[in-house]
Amino acid sequence: MLLPAAFITSLGNNIQLLGAALLLVRAQGSMLDVGWLFIAVAVPQAVLSPYFGRLADRFDRRRLWVGCDLLSAGAALALPVGLALGVAQQPLVYATNFALAVIAAQFTPASAALIRERVPADRLRHFNAHYEIALQSGMLLSAAAGGVALQYFGPQPLFTFNACTFALSALLVTAVGARRGTVSSEPSYRPRPTNRRSSVGLGPLVVLFAQGLVVVTVFNALMPVLVVGEWHRGASVLGMTDALGGVGFLLAAAVYRWSGSRLGDVRLAVGGFLVCSCLLVLQPLFGVPALMAFVLLGAFLFGQSRIATRSLLMTSVDESRVGHVFGIANGYGLAATVVVMLLASVVTGRSDTRFGFAVLALIGVLSATLAAAWISTNSRRAASRQLEHAAVQQK
């Protein structure tokens, strides 16, 4: 029940966001106009996610998820109703997406905490692979559904459909049922940290998790400007390109079992982000066919990195703190997104999207390199502590 609910919620959120971005582009909006839309979505989540993460650890997580979906359905429905009533388009787009962003600040930590609560520890890595694919596929496939629907049916049916996706997600999560037994704020079992957890540390995992948010958000802002604004292609071309990204994520889920066991989650997370960042530079250089190929390959690598990062972050803390940790990671990631979005918007506005993609790629390489160096330092310190402990025991 949680997997299709996550997919539908992600699909609905991003249909709303990308459909709104396409409306702005068609209204002769610049990259900066689109960037401000994504910033309006990122700022409330960056500010509220750490606090809402604590709420996810204190209250019923299933009810929080359902409540977020129902509120999102109402907020999403306000956009087509407002357009039908003749409300000014640009303020309405910003207002409805801002409201959805506030709700999403609660949804992200609540969904992560509910998964940690309901999924047995020995199945977490397997489940996280499918969950991350559901989340990211919904995000990428939203451009396919949103682009085609906006081109052929207009904005009102598109955004009405978006409201229905949230309602369906609420029904699926309700069907999960209440947790059996007494729910305590403290987990009944606290696994002893393994060497891998202690050697990696939370800091670099938060950096990698944040990098994933930055790449997806800024990429989704650059794509409609590139395809529709600069190349003058239809929204359906944008949809087909991002649909291939969804295929890449599905392939990533299929390969992750093998790659994760052979390479390890840490290498997979860092290495995948590094290569994916390099591919970003090439995407706007060679036309639509090459863009589709690079998006497919990039999503394949990015998907595995996201799965590995999510698994590492979720298993690095006890169940009672998962919501708080994911709230902090989500808040930090979206705060970084605001900075990168502004930078990419200004650079693109003064040149074109090729330089916007290059800025995103450079920042991705720097953050992945920082995480790798941080992990290496933590590993050396952990090894040194183990040697000192062993020496003390021998004495």
Image: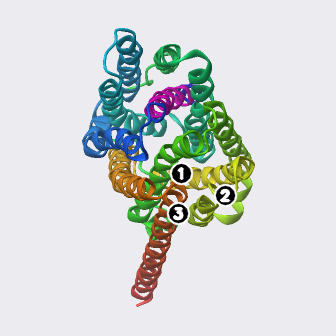
Does 14 appear in magenta?
yes
Q: Which kind of residue does numbered mark 1 sit on?
A: Ser
Does 281 appear in magenta?
no
Q: Tell me the CA gap for discs 2 and 3.
A: 29 Å
Q: Would you say residue 326 is visible in this rendering? A: yes
Q: How many marks?
A: 3
Q: Would you say residue 187 is visible in this rendering? A: no
Q: Which kind of residue does numbered mark 2 sit on?
A: Gly
Query: What secondary structure characterizes most of the magenta part?
Result: helix
Residue stretch rendered in magenta on the structure: 6-24
Q: At 65% from the left edge and 31% from the top edge, which residue is drawn?
A: 236
CB under 8 Å between discs 3 and 1: no
Q: At 50% from the left edge and 26% from the top edge, which residue is drawn?
A: 12
State which mark lies toward you, 2 or 3.
3
- First in sequence: mark 3 or mark 1? 1
Q: At 49% from the left edge and 77% from the top edge, which residue is drawn?
A: 376
Q: Quadrant of residue 301?
A: bottom right
Q: Which residue is mark 3?
A: 358
* Crowding near the residue tagged with mark 3, few <14, some 14–19, many ≥20 C-alpha atoms within 10 Å: many
Q: Tell me the CA gap for discs 3 and 1.
A: 29 Å
Q: Which mark is residue 88?
A: none
Q: Residue 214: horizontal and vertical position, in percent?
A: 45, 52
Q: Which kind of residue does numbered mark 3 sit on?
A: Ala
